[in-house]
Image (cartoon, coloured by chain):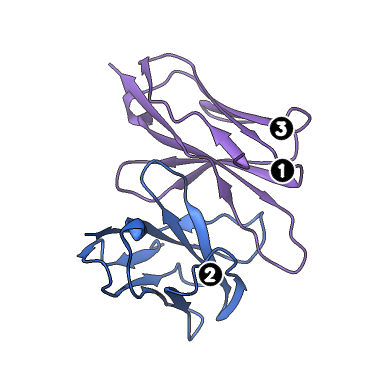
Chain colours: A blue, B purple
């Protein structure tokens, strides 16, 4: 079974530029998550989708971050404009359904450096 | 105060040692407790999952949850160099209407030396 795919793996941009990350979840997984992991910290949930609907985006900085999952499969996360403090690894995860008993499978992440 | 506290380490142990990793938490609503392992430049992978209080064993790994003390532990027996990684505790609460946000600790960096 293929895992969660993410691209690009690495991205370097200057502050105030925009950037987009792509995620392809495990086939059949209805729930998709985007996490931000700053160096030396645990992942922090940014947004959770159930199919193509948003379940939780309470920690997404909506003035600069946006995410979509138009057909209930792939998802993109965008930052516009980027700030220095956005430097982090952006992890995508998916689970079969929403609910604590369903394991979340993580992708390898996209490492973003903002200079 | 953070919802989940975890000593970042680093923790260095000799091969074959018993390793004890711990987290404390403040949110009484947490009912699901997990330990993830994260190798360098990889995403976290689930190691152990426990619902409510008690112990759970899986091979060399044992997870313990003490809800009365708001304290969880992961024990690794006969540690191997391949266990060298960052170990993240994670917790979630039952949420009516959907959503199962995981709240992670900062992770403990473990190195098992030959």
The numbered mark 2 sits on a residue in which chain?
A
Q: Which residue is mark 2?
A: A29
Mark 1 Cα shell of 10 Å, populated few (<14), some (14-19), many (≥20): some
Alpha carbon distance from label 3 to label 1: 8 Å
Query: How many numbered marks are there?
Result: 3
| Tag of residue B27 | 1
Mark toward the start of the polypeptide (3 vs 1) = 1
- Distance of label 1 from label 2 (alpha carbons): 29 Å
Up-down relation of residue A50 to residue B82 (above or below): below
Q: Position of residue A81 (x, y in %)?
A: 33, 74
Q: Identify the residue position indicated by label 3 in the image.
A: B70
Quadrant, the C terminus of chain B: top left
Marks 3,2: beta carbons within 8 A: no
> CB atoms at circles 3 and 1 under 8 Å apart?
no
Kindly identify the residue that appears in the image at 26 percent across and 66 percent down: A15
The front one of A3 and B53 is B53
- Say whether residue B15 is left or right of residue A94: left
Label 1 sits on a secondary structure element that is loop
Local SS, label 2 = loop
| Residue B59 can be seen in this image | yes
Question: Horizontal placement of B59 versus B100: left or right?
Answer: left
């Amino acid at each position: 079974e293929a895992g969660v795919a993410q691209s690009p793996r690495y991205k370097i941009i200057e502050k105030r530029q925009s950037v987009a990350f792509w995620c392809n979840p495990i086939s059949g997984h209805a729930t998709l998550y985007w996490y931000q992991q700053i160096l030396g910290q645990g992942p922090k949930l940014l947004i959770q989708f159930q199919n193509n609907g948003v379940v939780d985006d309470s920690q997404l900085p909506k003035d600069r971050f946006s995410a979509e999952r138009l057909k209930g499969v792939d998802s993109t996360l965008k930052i516009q404009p980027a700030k220095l403090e956005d430097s982090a690894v952006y992890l995508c995860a998916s689970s079969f359904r929403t609910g604590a008993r369903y394991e979340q499978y993580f992708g390898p992440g996209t490492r973003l450096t903002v200079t | 105060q953070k919802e989940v506290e975890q000593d970042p380490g680093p923790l260095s142990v000799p091969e074959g040692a018993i390793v004890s990793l711990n987290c404390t938490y403040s949110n009484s609503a947490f009912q699901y407790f997990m330990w993830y392992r994260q190798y360098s430049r990889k995403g976290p992978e689930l190691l152990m999952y426990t619902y409510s209080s008690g112990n759970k064993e899986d091979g060399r790994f044992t997870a313990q949850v003490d809800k009365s003390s708001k304290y969880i532990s992961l024990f690794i027996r006969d540690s191997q160099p391949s266990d060298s990684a960052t170990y993240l505790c994670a917790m979630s609460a039952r949420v009516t209407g959907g959503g199962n946000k995981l709240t992670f600790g900062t992770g403990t960096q473990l190195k098992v030396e030959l």
